[in-house]
Amino acid sequence: MSTRPAVHLILPLAMTLLLAAPGSRAELAAWEQAKVSALGRDLATATDALYDTFIKQPTPGLGSMQSHAYYRLKQLVRLLRIEARELAKSVEKGEGREQTLSIYENLMQLTRSARGEASKVLVLQETGERAAAVRGVLNQLGPYYDPDFPTLAPHPNIEPGTTR
């Protein structure tokens, strides 16, 4: 008995199901250049404030359990600031979703990495408040780039009023 006929039946069925699935996806928010430009500026301002606040907090002692995570987080916050400025500059020049999508994707990857590192570092309340402001802008910006954007929840280790 050959399995080949079964493959011929299953493959078209699988393709039909895959083609039907996009109807269940959410839709992108309609691109509003002025709104996205304003959000880009807000994000650049928020990431500047986050970086400035973060570098002022006490550095863990060398050799401490938090030292490596702290320096990794510092680098990620610096890169977030750079990417946010680039996004703001690009949308301000009139670039749209297609032209700025890779910048947004980099921002989100950096955000996920930073949230992971933040779990390993003692973060002061003021830094947490700045991180919450960045998160708030990203939550407004996300639907313009990702139809299935998962709203970023408060990070229990760094944002005030949340618990682990």
Image: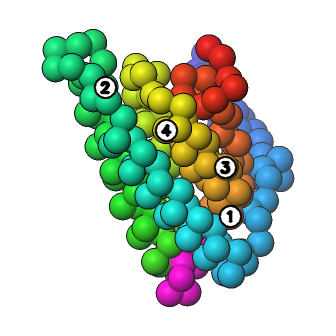
SS class, disc 1:
helix
Q: Which quadrant is the C terminus positioned in?
A: top right
Residue under circle 2?
69
Q: Which residues are magenta?
A: 91-99
Q: Mark 1 belongs to which amino acid?
A: Tyr
Q: Mark 4 belongs to which amino acid?
A: Thr
* Mark carried by residue 127: 4
Q: Closer to the N terminus: mark 1 or mark 4?
A: 4
- Residues under labels 1 and 4: Cα distance? 27 Å
Task: Indicate left or right for 78 with 62 as reference.
Answer: right
Q: Where is residue 36, by image quadrant?
A: bottom right
| Residue found 61% across the figure and 49% down from its top | 133
Residue 97 drawn in magenta = yes
Q: Closer to the N terminus: mark 3 or mark 1?
A: 3
Residue under circle 1?
144
Residue under circle 3?
136
Q: Is residue 152 visible?
A: yes
- Residues under labels 2 and 1: Cα distance? 32 Å
User: Are circles 2 and 4 on residues that touch, CB within 8 Å?
Assistant: no
Q: Residues within 10 Å of mark 3 (few under 14, many from 20)?
A: some
| Residue found 34% across the figure and 41% down from its top | 56
SS class, disc 2:
helix
| Residue found 27% across the figure and 29% down from its top | 59
User: Are circles 2 and 3 on residues that touch, CB within 8 Å?
Assistant: no
User: Are circles 2 and 1 on residues that touch, CB within 8 Å?
Assistant: no
Asked if residue 47 is positioned above or below residue 88 in the image, the reply reads above
Task: Indicate left or right for 25 with 57 as reference.
Answer: right
Residue 141 percent coordinates (x, y): 65, 60
